[in-house]
């Protein structure tokens, strides 16, 4: 880029960047949870990365650090009813949108994990496997994952026979057997094939 005199102009660099990621697209049970995180450059957090590659103990430690040291953290959700009404992709976009809108600091740009971006007030950039490439997305990945896991622990107390504390709502053999035996509850995604088939029976 250059000005009218032909002098090179520096590329625009966003000052405040948030990372955005979600957890819970694949499960048969519960909300999809998204997180948006703006890290503080003056307080770097070691060990950030793809939450799926970290142990549960490390995720919980980083979760606490991110909440304590980041400039802003926000969580957005889309309900089971919204997932069934919109489809899981659109519900994930909605959860991400809500997460960014809930930030206490307005970002100049949002970096989104994956290949699609929600509609936001700021510019966006999708990054495939971004949770392993951008620290702010890695931080959002950890916040979203730990938050959803906590949700599943809470739901396990209400519905202990599904084994949600173990599989977190994913379609494991244990979960499918429990569905066949106990039926579907109000937090199961009726638009997902395994749940729909149980309802048809």
Image (cartoon, rainbow, N blue to C red):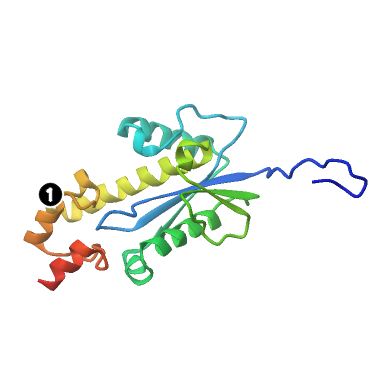
- Residue 123, image x, y percentages: 63, 54
> What residue is shown at x 47% (from left), y 56% (from top)?
96
Is 200 in front, or is 77? Answer: 200
> What residue is shown at x 15% (from left), y 70% (from top)?
199
Q: Tag 1, which secondary structure?
A: helix
Q: Is residue 54 above or below residue 14?
A: above
> What residue is shown at x 29% (from left), y 58% (from top)?
30
Left or right of 17? Residue 171 is left
Left or right of 92? Residue 70 is right
- Residue 56, image x, y percentages: 31, 34
- Residue 49, image x, y percentages: 44, 34
Is 92 in front, or is 107? Answer: 92
Quadrant containing the C terminus is bottom left
Q: Residue furthest top?
A: 46
Is 168 in front, or is 42? Answer: 168
- Residue 54, image x, y percentages: 35, 32
Q: Residues within 10 Å of mark 1 (few under 14, many from 20)?
A: some
The residue indicated by pointer 1 is 174
């Amino acid at each position: 880029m250059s000005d009218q005199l032909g002098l090179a102009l520096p590329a625009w660099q966003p000052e405040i960047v948030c990372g955005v990621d979600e957890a819970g697209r694949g499960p048969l049970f519960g909300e999809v949870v998204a997180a948006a995180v703006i890290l503080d450059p003056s307080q770097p957090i070691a060990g950030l990365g793809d939450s799926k590659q970290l142990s549960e103990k490390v995720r919980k430690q980083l979760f606490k650090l991110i909440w304590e040291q980041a400039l802003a953290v926000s969580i957005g959700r889309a309900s089971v009813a919204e997932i069934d009404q919109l489809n899981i992709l659109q519900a994930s976009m909605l959860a991400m949108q809500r997460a960014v809108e809930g930030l206490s600091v307005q970002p100049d740009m949002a970096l989104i994990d994956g290949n699609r971006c929600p509609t936001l007030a700021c510019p966006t950039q999708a990054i495939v496997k971004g949770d392993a490439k951008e620290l702010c997305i890695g931080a959002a990945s950890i916040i979203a994952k730990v938050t959803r896991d906590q949700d599943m622990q809470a739901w396990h107390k209400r519905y202990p026979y599904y084994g949600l504390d173990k599989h977190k709502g994913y379609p494991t053999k244990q979960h499918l057997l429990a569905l066949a035996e106990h039926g579907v509850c109000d937090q199961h995604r009726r638009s997902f094939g395994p749940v729909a088939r149980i309802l048809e029976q």
